[in-house]
Image (cartoon, rainbow, N blue to C red):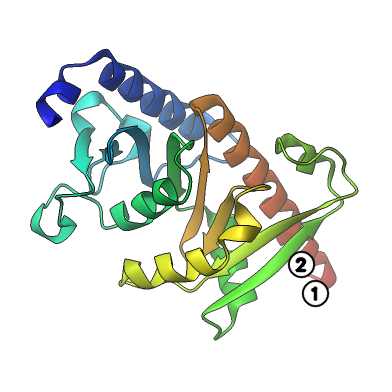
Amino acid sequence: MLNNIENSSALDDAQQALIKVAQTMTSNKNYPLRHGSLSYYLEDGMFLMTKKGVILSDLKESDLIVVDEHSLNPQDHEDISPYFVLHKQIYTQDETLKIVSHINSVNAAVLSRYCLGDQASVLKTIEQYEMLTSFQAIETYDAYLPVPIVANSDDFDTIAVEMNAMWEYMQSMGQGYLIGGNGLVTWAKDADELIENVHAWEYLLDCEFKAQLLAAGA
């Protein structure tokens, strides 16, 4: 099955989709996002993913690897990012999803750490911004976006368990969550939607960060 995937047009499409996402995110002057991981679901538990340590601004086809969630132990493969666990978990939750990103966003890292304190997880909201309507499930600025936040950990299974517990808040609206002191995880059904989601999250988190500074009199 893996050999069939590696020689298919579906793989070519997935490669181009991830390269497009990486180029768009890293070229944004307001939110240049160069570090993280991307993946694209192929079929039967297999997806294309960025290799461990890849810089997104220089992403090319040789930086991508096909992984099989049924037979892979990420610890036995030096090219596989440990964030594989989080990508796999999202595809398991919803079979209609095609693409996932984890990015080391400054706004996400700072705000998530501030909001978490010493808690393992917390649910916050972002409310009444026009940019909320960028998400397909939100039709008016007079709405709220659930913002699940989980504590960072080197045990990615622990993060996945916390994410599962809050999945109901994420699946239909913002399609994302924050990892404390780390960044943003978000997903979509195609590359264009993912790019829009990432931009909306970054804009909204930037607004919230500046609002916190104003509230503190900075």
Q: On the image, numbered disc 2 is attached to which residue?
A: 212
Packing grade of label 1 (10 A; few <14, some 14-19, many >=20) is few
- The answer to which of 30 and 76 lies nearer the viewer is 76
Q: In the rendered view, would you say 136 is above or below 85?
A: above
| Residue found 60% across the figure and 50% down from its top | 171
Residue 11 appears in the picture as rendered: yes
Packing grade of label 2 (10 A; few <14, some 14-19, many >=20) is few
Q: Amino acid at mark 2?
A: Gln
| Residue found 58% across the figure and 66% down from its top | 166
Is there CB contact under 8 Å for labels 2 and 1?
yes
In the displayed orientation, state which residue is furthest to the right.
Answer: 142
Q: On the image, numbered disc 1 is attached to which residue?
A: 216
Q: Amino acid at mark 1?
A: Ala
Q: In the rendered view, would you say 105 is above or below 141?
A: below
Horizontal side of residue 169 vs 12, given as left or right? right
Q: How many discs mark residues in the rendered view?
A: 2
